[in-house]
Image (cartoon, rainbow, N blue to C red):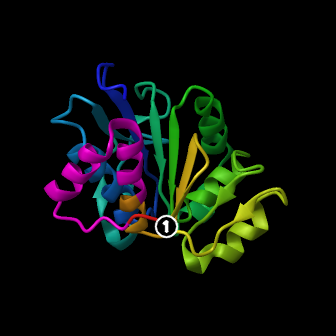
Amino acid sequence: MEQARQGRNVAVFIFEQVEPLDFAGPFEVFLAGSNRGQDFQVYTVAEHDSPIIALGGLSINPAYTIANCPKPDLLVIPGGWGSRKEMNNETITNWIREVSDDIEIILSVCTGALILAKAKLLDGLKVTTNRSAIHELRNVVPTSTEIIEEARYVDNGKIVLSAGVSAGMDAALYVVEKLLGEDRAIEAANIMEYDWKRD
């Protein structure tokens, strides 16, 4: 365990028509698992600094843009209807691909997998997404990619992908466990009064 090291930066990417729980769930998990900010510094990042309108009209002010955000150690890519547009946004997919070289873990939630596919990061991996978007994912991943339809989340080492919405919280708790141990993940779930569903 690397608890002695400086806290990790957790960048949560947000975009127009993002699914609220896809980003807010993992945000809360890493916050709850941070030991009061000592082990994770969690922040939102967007392409531009203007407010982001999530599904349902929720307005979020991103803390940073992709041009000025602190160097992420972990990157969360959520889904939602807006992922269908962002997956074709080369500014975003290029940024994700560029920063991925130095990132410890990328966590995709729901249709965030579509964005990672377009960033060319899923070649040869085991992947999953929201059950209702499996066919969309199949259309954009390479033939070497294996889609695991029934998994709540899958771990490829550097890239962890989860199914829809609340599955992102389960996967984020798994990442906390992977980095800081089972006790920390259980503590985070208890702080949130969340019933952690392990895969």
Which span is picked out in magenta? 171-197
Where disc 1 sits, the SS reads loop
- The image shows residue 29 at horizontal and vertical percentages of 28, 51
- Seen as rendered, the residue at the extreme right is 143
- Seen as rendered, the residue at the extreme bottom is 132
| Residue 83 belongs to magenta span | no
Residue beneath the point at 64% across and 60% down: 127
Viewer-nearest residue: 52 or 146: 146
Say how many tags the image has.
1
In the shown orientation, is residue 61 left or right of residue 187?
A: right
- The image shows residue 150 at horizontal and vertical percentages of 58, 75
Query: Quadrant of the image for the N terminus?
Result: top left
In the shown orientation, is residue 109 left or right of residue 64?
A: right
Viewer-nearest residue: 161 or 156: 156
Main SS type for the magenta part?
helix
Residue beneath the point at 53% across and 43% down: 106
| Residue 181 belongs to magenta span | yes
Residue on which the image places disc 1: 80
In the shown orientation, is residue 188 left or right of residue 52?
A: left
- The image shows residue 16 at horizontal and vertical percentages of 46, 59
Viewer-nearest residue: 154 or 65: 154
- Seen as rendered, the residue at the extreme top is 5
Residue 71, above or below 113: above
Residue beneath the point at 45% across and 30% down: 73
Query: Is residue 139 visible in the rendered structure shown here?
Result: yes
Residue 138, above or below 30: below
In the shown orientation, is residue 65 left or right of residue 190?
A: right
Query: Is residue 63 visible in the rendered structure shown here?
Result: no
Give the amino acid at mark 1: Gly
Callout 1 environment at 10 Å: few (<14), some (14 to 19), or many (20+)?
many
